[in-house]
């Protein structure tokens, strides 16, 4: 007795542990199971729905249900039927309760009539469909492929009716199909199986090409009824023999494979870059496919052949036509732009010098005096000039002499401005929207670090960098025949000053975006450097005397202003004739320079511009 009670308690504990996820919340439950025994699952559903189940001994296995929704009694029962259907079991309703048995023997388990058609979708039911106009026996071969193996379909000739056993959902679909076929028009009925085309697409075309009735509402005696069964990819036709033959011939013509020759195409590009075009087309191919309407059977694939600059495209014919149209607009010759630049560095030096030089001597010659290096003209040269000219003043350089020649005071005022320095006159030809770059300079090593090991050896690491004049221009031609230019210009030079950290470089840089017309010259520039230098020289002790010391001092005040000016002129070149004209003009300019410098020599510029090409 104790053993029996223990076993019952153990079963109760196991059952509670397995169904802790089945939580009743009022009149609702949450069902969550993980590899639970199907027998326990059936028992628990019976308790929740207050229904009786008769379980076939062959119903075994584990079930998993994941749900976060709160289900009422009817929802739990529908979920229960769906779980059993997934595991290959059918549920038949009987006076004693619901029978649960394998689907392959369900039709021998008894009849479960559903006259109203309101049974749950997964419940195995039997319906009798009365046929009003068609012949029931003629519908059987048409409907039989739609019935699963565990279902049943039969005709009752005396009643002109169909008996169907299947899941309630499937029977409702069959009932709708039978209603379409059971139209009032007289005629034959036939089924056409499609091999290549899709039933839904074909019936859409037939709607546009023929006077047929498709879908619901096929009730005309003058038209042919066509029903598409997308599950088996078949078309069911009913109508007069002559019309059926015409429609069948049309369906056969439509049911052909798509042209393979139009799907895979190798397209070489003349001007555009294959990789960039492939990326562009991949971004818009989705919109092209949507424009075509129905989803394509073949997924569009675009690959770039960089070696031959070509595209390999696999697509539906309609999509391929759109791609060809896009390529005709993209793969076109681009205009070129000749960029001519003049880079000038203008240095403006303002120098103001004010000083007094004293000369003490006799008639025999120069004995002593002061000679400051800041002065524009030395004392000895001034004396020499005065003696030779026989005058007491010297206007050259703005220098004046006061007093006699033995003891003179020289007051100087000098202002000078230096000229410009033409750094470079680069020219480069580039495509529209393509960056052009010119570097005139040298590659120098720069110390980046050093380290030493335990020995006395020291290792120095260096990197080589370009030093010189660099000009980068990216032209963009607009519809108004103007050129927007992204300009980056830098002048970098190594300084003569030494540093413990390495070489010092001076950088002058201009970066801007401008717009110029065709053959219009514009100038870019600005103050790059501004240096102020002040220096003083004096006679020791005497130069420090208040008031009087100014007679024994000389001072210099210098201002250096450096401006970097870049003159740029874009020339738009379209077509071969325009390019030949510009090239000839440039060549003639070089020839003129060569003729001025020296007589033409063999192997000169002619060899550069007109090379002899080999036939190989």
Image (tube, grey):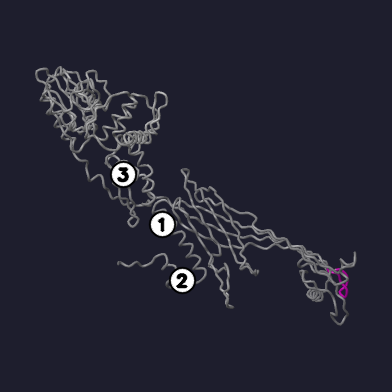
| The image quarter in which residue 101 lies | top left
29 horizontally vs 480: left or right: left
Does 28 sit above or below residue 355?
above
In the image, farthest residue toward the left? 158
Mark 1, secondary structure of its residue: helix
Q: Quadrant of the N terminus?
A: top left
Whether residue 211 is visible to the viewer of this picture, yes or no, is no
The residue under label 2 is: 600
- Residue 34 % position (x, y): 35, 38
- Residue 532 % position (x, y): 73, 61
The residue under label 1 is: 580
* Mark carried by residue 300: 3
N-terminal of the pair, mark 1 or mark 3, is 3
Residue segment shown in magenta? 402-410
Q: Marks 2 and 1, Cα distance to the nearest angstrom?
A: 23 Å
Q: Nearer the viewer, mark 2 or mark 3?
A: 3
Asked whether 575 or 595 is in front, the reply is 575
Whether residue 596 is visible to the viewer of this picture, yes or no, is yes
Is residue 405 a member of the stretch shown in magenta?
yes
Asked whether 450 or 400 is in front, the reply is 450
- For image coordinates 58% across by 71% down, the residue present is 451
Q: Marks 1 and 3, Cα distance to the nearest angstrom?
A: 43 Å
Other residues around mark 3 within 10 Å, as few (<14) / some (14–19) / many (≥20): some
């Amino acid at each position: 007795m104790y053993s029996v009670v223990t076993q019952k308690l153990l079963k109760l504990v196991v059952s509670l542990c397995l169904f802790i996820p089945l939580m009743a919340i009022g009149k609702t439950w949450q069902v969550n199971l993980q590899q639970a025994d199907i027998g326990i699952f059936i028992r628990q559903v019976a308790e929740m729905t207050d229904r009786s189940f008769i379980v076939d001994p062959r119903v075994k296995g584990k079930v998993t249900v994941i749900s976060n929704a709160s289900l009422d009694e009817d929802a739990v029962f529908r979920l229960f039927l769906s779980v059993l259907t997934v595991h290959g079991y059918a549920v038949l309703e009987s006076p004693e309760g619901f029978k649960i048995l394998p689907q392959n023997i369900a039709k021998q388990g008894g009849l479960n009539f559903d006259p109203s058609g309101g049974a749950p979708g997964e419940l195995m039911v039997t319906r009798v469909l009365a046929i009003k106009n068609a012949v029931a026996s003629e519908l059987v071969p048409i409907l039989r492929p739609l019935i699963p193996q565990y279902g049943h379909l039969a005709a009752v000739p005396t009643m002109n009716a169909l008996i169907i056993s299947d899941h309630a959902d499937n029977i409702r679909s069959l009932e709708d199909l039978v209603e379409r076929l059971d139209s009032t028009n007289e005629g034959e009925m036939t089924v056409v199986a499609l091999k290549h085309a899709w039933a839904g697409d074909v019936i859409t075309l037939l709607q546009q090409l023929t006077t047929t009735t498709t879908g619901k509402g096929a009730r005309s005696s003058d038209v042919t009824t066509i029903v598409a069964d997308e599950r088996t990819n078949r078309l069911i036709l009913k109508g007069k023999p002559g019309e059926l033959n015409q429609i069948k011939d049309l369906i056969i013509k439509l049911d052909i494979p798509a042209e393979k020759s139009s799907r895979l195409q190798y397209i070489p590009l003349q001007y555009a870059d294959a990789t960039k075009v492939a990326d562009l087309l991949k971004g818009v191919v989705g919109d092209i496919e949507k424009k075509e309407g129905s989803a394509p059977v073949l997924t569009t694939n675009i690959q770039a052949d960089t070696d031959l600059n070509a595209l390999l495209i696999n697509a539906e014919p309609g999509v391929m036509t759109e791609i060809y149209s896009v390529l005709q607009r993209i793969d076109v010759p681009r205009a070129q732009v000749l960029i001519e630049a003049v880079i000038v560095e203008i240095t403006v030096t303002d120098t103001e010098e004010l000083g007094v030089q004293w000369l003490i001597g006799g008639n025999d010659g120069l004995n002593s005096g002061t000679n400051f290096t800041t002065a524009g003209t030395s004392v000895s040269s001034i004396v020499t000039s005065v003696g030779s000219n026989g005058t007491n003043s010297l206007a050259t350089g703005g220098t004046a002499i006061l007093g006699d020649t033995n003891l003179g005071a020289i007051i100087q005022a000098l202002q000078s401005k230096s000229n410009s320095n033409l750094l470079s006159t680069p020219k480069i030809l580039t495509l529209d929207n393509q960056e052009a770059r010119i570097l005139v300079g040298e590659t120098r090593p720069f110390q980046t670090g050093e380290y030493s090991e335990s020995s006395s050896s020291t290792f120095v690491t260096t990197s080589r960098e370009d030093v010189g004049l660099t000009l980068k221009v990216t032209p963009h031609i607009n519809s108004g025949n103007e050129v927007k230019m992204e300009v980056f210009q830098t002048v970098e030079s190594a300084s003569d000053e030494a540093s413990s950290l390495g070489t010092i470089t001076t950088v002058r840089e201009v970066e801007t975006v401008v717009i110029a017309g065709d053959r219009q010259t514009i100038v870019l520039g600005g103050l790059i450097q501004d240096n102020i230098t002040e220096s003083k020289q004096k006679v020791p002790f005497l130069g420090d005397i208040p008031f009087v010391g100014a007679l024994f001092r000389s001072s210099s005040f210098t201002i250096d202003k450096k401006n970097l000016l870049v003159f740029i002129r874009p020339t738009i070149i379209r077509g071969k004739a325009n390019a030949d004209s510009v090239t000839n003009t440039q060549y003639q300019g070089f020839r003129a320079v060569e003729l001025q410098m020296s007589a033409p020599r063999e192997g000169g510029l002619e060899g550069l511009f007109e090379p002899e090409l080999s036939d190989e």
